[in-house]
Image: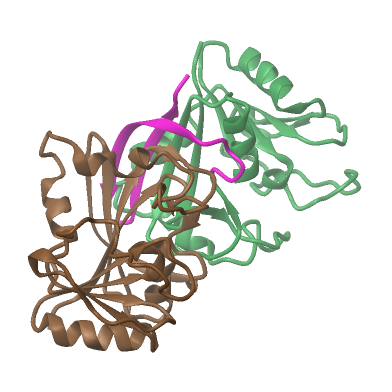
Chain colours: A green, B brown
Amino acid sequence: MGIVFSDLSVSADGFATGLHQSEESPFGDIDETWLHGWMFDDSGDNRAEVEAITASGATIMGRNMFGPVRGEWDREWRGWWGPNPPYHNPVFVLTRFPRAPIEMEGGTTFHFVTDGAGRALELARAAAGDRDVSVAGGPGTVNQFLTAGLLDELRLHVTPCVLGAGVRVFDGVPAQRLDRVSVRATPLVTHIVYRPRR
Amino acid sequence: MGIVFSDLSVSADGFATGLHQSEESPFGDIDETWLHGWMFDDSGDNRAEVEAITASGATIMGRNMFGPVRGEWDREWRGWWGPNPPYHNPVFVLTRFPRAPIEMEGGTTFHFVTDGAGRALELARAAAGDRDVSVAGGPGTVNQFLTAGLLDELRLHVTPCVLGAGVRVFDGVPAQRLDRVSVRATPLVTHIVYRPRR
């Protein structure tokens, strides 16, 4: 069985997204390039970390990471990523509102899970087989998995900026020691991998 | 003229001290060894960073870093550090309550500054001459200097733990990009040095 991992790009003050998400601003009222510019850098410095983000057999995400629609699914939103999303595997979206699966190009199918994070993980594990499961975000969802003890590995990509507001990694997560598995610095970002202790 | 630097040991979620400081618990209701154990490690792995913390010609600190006394100086508190504090230079304590200087052993003299961070920095620079000035803490004081644009270098010592409550580095500091000067990982801690941009 694979592990359950999560990647979050965070500011030096720990924010992984801003406030006031909208269709035009998936990460809210921040300059998103501050957090994610390193992923689109041509140097190749961070290729291994970028590739690892989607190297899973199944993906879990919160509803806000899937889109800006709130409440009932009253419009035909199919994710932020166009017709061929970067996941290329089954994606389980946590929501309170049922919706039929959406099959996209390239192997991504969005499934909507209404009975909680634990159930989403069961489905994702079954879909992933021996491969890893990714909890893609947002930070609220990652914190939910951390709090429930369901995350094996958290890969923080710490960018040199202060955001001052938004949603933080670790918010609401119980006090605990972590194992720091690795640290790697490239010019644009500091990659730090933690594992919660069991 | 030297630089103005600050060292803070922080948790993975950015807390540099806990809540509810008392005379028995200078860092409040946390296990202080989670944040500072690396400083007392015998391995020598972190010797350079430990020595750099006190390598200044003068020091500035907030009143709560100096002690648990609140309001008027109605008791003979002389700091947490015993008769020979580790600073060995003039220490300027920010407070609203005047008090005569206290000369300790080993070159440390505590001066009490009642007219603000800017004035404390003037006095510290004058005392330090060509040497650096350290803003020793706590995090509220460091954030005050960051917000005022008075800090040249912030050295974070990131420890693998989640604290979940306390006082955070960067709280209240305006959104901004930073320059990341260096990253060095040792088994117990990740040293990350930032410089605010001018």
Is A52 on the left-hand or right-hand side of A78?
Answer: left
Quadrant including the N terminus of chain B: bottom left
User: Which secondary structure dominates the residues rendered in magenta?
Assistant: strand
Highlighted magenta segment, given as a residue range: A170-198
Q: Nearer the viewer, residue B19 or B198?
A: B19
Quarter where residue B120 is shown:
bottom left
Residue at the extreme front of the image, as rendered: B75
Figure check: B119 above or below A99? below
Is A61 on the left-hand or right-hand side of B171?
Answer: right
Query: Residue A11: horizontal and vertical position, in percent?
Result: 46, 57
Quarter where residue B87 is shown:
bottom left
Is residue A140 on the magenta stretch?
no
Query: Residue A180: horizontal and vertical position, in percent?
Result: 34, 33
Q: Is residue A138 visible?
A: no
Figure check: A189 above or below A54? below
Figure check: A3 above or below B189? above
Query: Residue B88: horizontal and vertical position, in percent?
Result: 12, 66
Name the residue at 33% across, 65% down: B77
Query: Residue B38: horizontal and vertical position, in percent?
Result: 24, 40
Quadrant including the C terminus of chain B: bottom left
Q: Is residue B90 visible?
A: yes
Name the residue at 61% across, 29% down: A59
Q: Nearer the viewer, residue B186 or A32?
A: B186
Name the residue at 42% across, 44% down: B12
Name the residue at 16% across, 52% down: B49
Figure check: B120 above or below A198? below
Is residue A183 on the magenta stretch?
yes
Q: How many marks?
A: 0
